[in-house]
Each structure stands twice: as C-alpha cells, then as structure tokens.
Image (cartoon, rainbow, N blue to C red):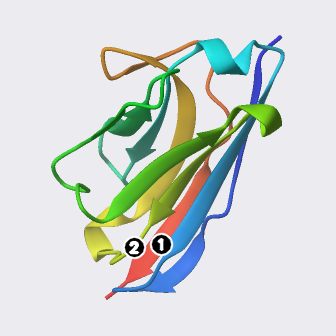
Amino acid sequence: QVQLVESGGGLVQAGGSLRLSCEASGIIFSGNAWGWFRQGAGKQREWVASITSGGYRNYADSVKGRFTISRDNAKNTVYLQMDSLKAEDTGIYYCNRVEFRLGTGAWGQGTQVTVSS
C-alpha cells in the first residue's frame, strides 16, 4: 500500500524559510506527477505546487516566486522549499500524486507549518 510521510514543518517568523520533505513508499515514484497541498484552519485543502515525471513545475499564484518544488526519484522524495513565508501560508501541508491539480490516492498525516507575523 502507498504510504506518504511528510516532514519539515515548524514555527517560523514571517520572511523565514522552511523545507518540507515527503517520502513515498509502496508506489513507483518516478512515473508519477507529485504535488503539495495545504489546508488552513477552517479552509478547504488547496493545491500549492506540482512537478511532473519529466520535471515540469507549476505553482499556485499565491506562492509563485517564493516556493520551489523538486523531486529526487532515487530517494522517492518530493520537496517544497518555502521562502519569504507569510502568515497566510500557515496550515497543514500534504503531498500526494497529482492529476489536474487534484490529489489522488490516500493522504498522509501532513506536516504543520505556522508562520508568525
């Protein structure tokens, strides 16, 4: 079965940086597009960024220029480098396989990101 383990979240001041990691198991990692999603308190989960099997990247307008998604197929891991963080970036961050900016398959436990203003 597919297992997703997100890590790297924490408490950071506005303007700071964090690097999230998501390790996948039970799946052929390299053949899939992967994405990051987030859910703020009282909000629906939203797509943040994605990277195709060929390395093409796409970002939500709210994070473009501040976040960078990358992948390491040898480690079955997808990353999200988050710079210039804002209070509105606060939420639980999840990774998943992605199709048309929607997560597919089961979700992991996520990792909490809190940005203090």
Q: Residue furthest left?
A: 61
Instruction: Name the quadrant of the N terminus.
Output: top right
Q: Residue at x 39, y 65 (%)?
A: 90
Q: Secondary structure at mark 2?
A: loop
Horizontal placement of 80 versus 31: left or right? left
Closer to the eye: label 1 or 2: 2
Say which amino acid is labelled 1.
Answer: Thr
Residue 59: image location, x then y, percent: 27, 42
- Is residue 102 positioned above or below 66 on the image? above
Question: Horizontal placement of 5 versus 116: left or right?
Answer: right
Residue at image point 38% right, 30% down: 56
Q: Is residue 26 left or right of residue 84?
A: right
Marks 1/2 in contact by CB < 8 Å: the verdict is: no
- Of 105 and 32, which appears nearest the observer? 32
**Amino acid type, mark 2:** Asp
Residue 62 percent coordinates (x, y)? 19, 54
Mark 1, secondary structure of its residue? strand
Q: Residues within 10 Å of mark 1 (few under 14, many from 20)?
A: many
Q: Residue at x 66, y 51 (%)?
A: 21
> Position of 62 compared to 90: left or right?
left
Give the residue number, with chain letter if any, for mark 1: 114
The quadrant of the picture occupied by the C terminus is bottom left
Quarter of the image holding residue 86?
bottom left
Q: Residue furthest front?
A: 54
Q: Earlier in the sequence, mark 1 or mark 2?
A: 2
Frontmost residue, 71 versus 22:
71
Residue at the spot 40% in from the left edge and 33% down from the top edge: 50
Image height check: is 106 above or below 24? above
Q: Give the label on residue 83, or none.
A: 2
Locate residue 12, reporting x and y percent.
50, 83
